[in-house]
Image: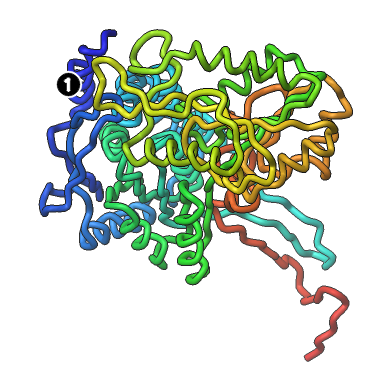
Amino acid sequence: MQTNDFDEFRERTLKKLGIEETNSGIFAGKWLPRSGKNIYTSISPVDGKVNASVWLADRGQYEEAVNQSIKAFEEWRSIPAPRRGEIIKALGDVLAKNKKDLGALVTLEAGKTTSEGEGEIQEMIDVAYFASGLSRQLYGFTMASERPDHRLYEQWLPLGPIAVISAFNFPSSVWSWNAMVAAVCGDTVVWKPSTKASLAAVGVMKIMTEELERLGAPQIFSLVASRGSEGGEWISNDRRIPLVSFTGSTATGQKIYENVARRIGRPILELGGNNCSIVSSRADMNLALKGVAFGALATAGQRCTSTRRVVVQDDIYDEFVSRLKDIYSKVKIGNPRQEGVLVGPLIDREAVRTFTDAVREAVSQGGKLIFGGEEIKVPGLEGGNYVRPALIEAKPDMEITKRETFGPLLYLFRYRTIEEAVKIHNSVPQGLSSAIFTTDLREEEYFLSYRGSDCGLANVNTSTAGAEIGGAFGGEKETGYGRESGSDSWKAYMRRQTVTINHGRDLPLSQGVRFDV
């Protein structure tokens, strides 16, 4: 696809998904009227041109959306879980039919390559199918009672209308991690998307709500597009919403956490990542180079799990860095729709400034810039937000390496022993994803032991980026709280109830307590 064809791609994508010039961003059982002056204009990071606009919610429309979610919950929770699973399976099927178009919308609005845009929708499909199977596995334990003629067990019950506040970098899939799983648990979902990715949310909701209507199911999903932190404040302070799942920056996550905790609600927080890969002299170097490059460059370094630091053993450091620099010099940057392009644009002009400022600051703190780090212009897409990925030789005491820069900036460190490598690895306040590349069993086991990685995700001989939906996703330290998607993460969206049934004719008490009347 030629760069000058991007206008045609934009027009075709929006038309196929029924995206208008200006769209309502509020769904409360129905699309609320487009009114008022609170409008967000979506600018494509690919070429800097307008995609379309979204009307954002005011407080009254937010109330309509939450009230609708409460009403839908009263009906949805009474539907047997396996039937709920069948409905979610049907949503996965309709997503599959619209995968290419929705993936194209992600490319248009977030700047992801075609492969990554469609991969995001595939992730939604996978989560829907996973949740459908889960609907028959919402198990509780039966325990032995110490009292005669007593039965003791636990059951899991729907929690209520929950809220998901999602980020621009995964504008659809992270919502689905929460929404699909919560839905089979019997919950309804209020979705507050990133303002920067409102169009993707509108596109997904159009397809979801039409399918739910066709199935005769309750409208279990509500949409509240809003400006900046406004919707987040409404949601996090709303006692009617028992659980809030937030994905975004640590600073904003702390505010959400404080608001939710103040009302004794439940948070799930997926915040900043400052992810590190250790490359041992015993690694398969070709594999390590590919894993580090993918982790650092995929989605232009705008993944929560992007590799931001790499710690390389002294013996192979010079060779590894030389070969990594060669890979970076050959990486194609530009139109994410073009064949062979691996690095698309950053999300907006602010992201470009943050990236270039971080490069300058790293150099001022003693880092050595060995590749890239500057803004570039792509012919035919001069309005886009493109940078050349940066490689910076760094020292562990550089303050900037303790912070997350959301872009393709990779810091390189040397180490001698595995103990030193892990110390560097764990020296930051974030704790999301980690990796080690080695063929040495002892190094691998050290990294995976209590002495090793302090992150929520640990990888051996694969990248920090690219988590599968079957595993619980989330981090430690300042990265957040709780888990999403796979394993037993479903328990966060339900309330546990311990049940005791006395089917005898006496009233024995536990712990040998006597109470004779």
Please give the name of the residue rendered at 18% of the width and 19% of the height, measured from the top-left corner. Answer: 7
98 or 251, nearer to the observer: 251
Position of the N terminus by quadrant: top left
Q: Where residue 391 sits in the image (x, y, percent)?
A: 56, 27
Answer whether residue 303 is visible to the viewer in this image.
Answer: yes
149 or 346, nearer to the observer: 346
Q: Where residue 246 sits in the image (x, y, percent)?
A: 46, 50
Q: Where residue 4 sits in the image (x, y, percent)?
A: 21, 12
Q: Quadrant of residue 497?
A: bottom right
53 or 401, nearer to the observer: 401
Q: What residue did someone put label 1 on?
A: 11
Please give the name of the residue rendered at 64% of the width and 13% of the height, measured from the top-left corner. Answer: 323
Image: 366 above or below 283 = below
Position of the C terminus by quadrant: bottom right
Q: Is residue 491 left or right of residue 191?
A: right
Please give the name of the residue rendered at 58% of the width and 49% of the height, measured from the top-left corner. Answer: 479
Q: How many marks?
A: 1
Q: Is residue 288 left or right of residue 203?
A: right
Image: 136 above or below 1 = below
Answer whether residue 209 is visible to the viewer in this image.
Answer: no
Q: Of the residues shown, which amino acid type is indicated by label 1?
A: Glu
Q: Quadrant of residue 73?
A: bottom left
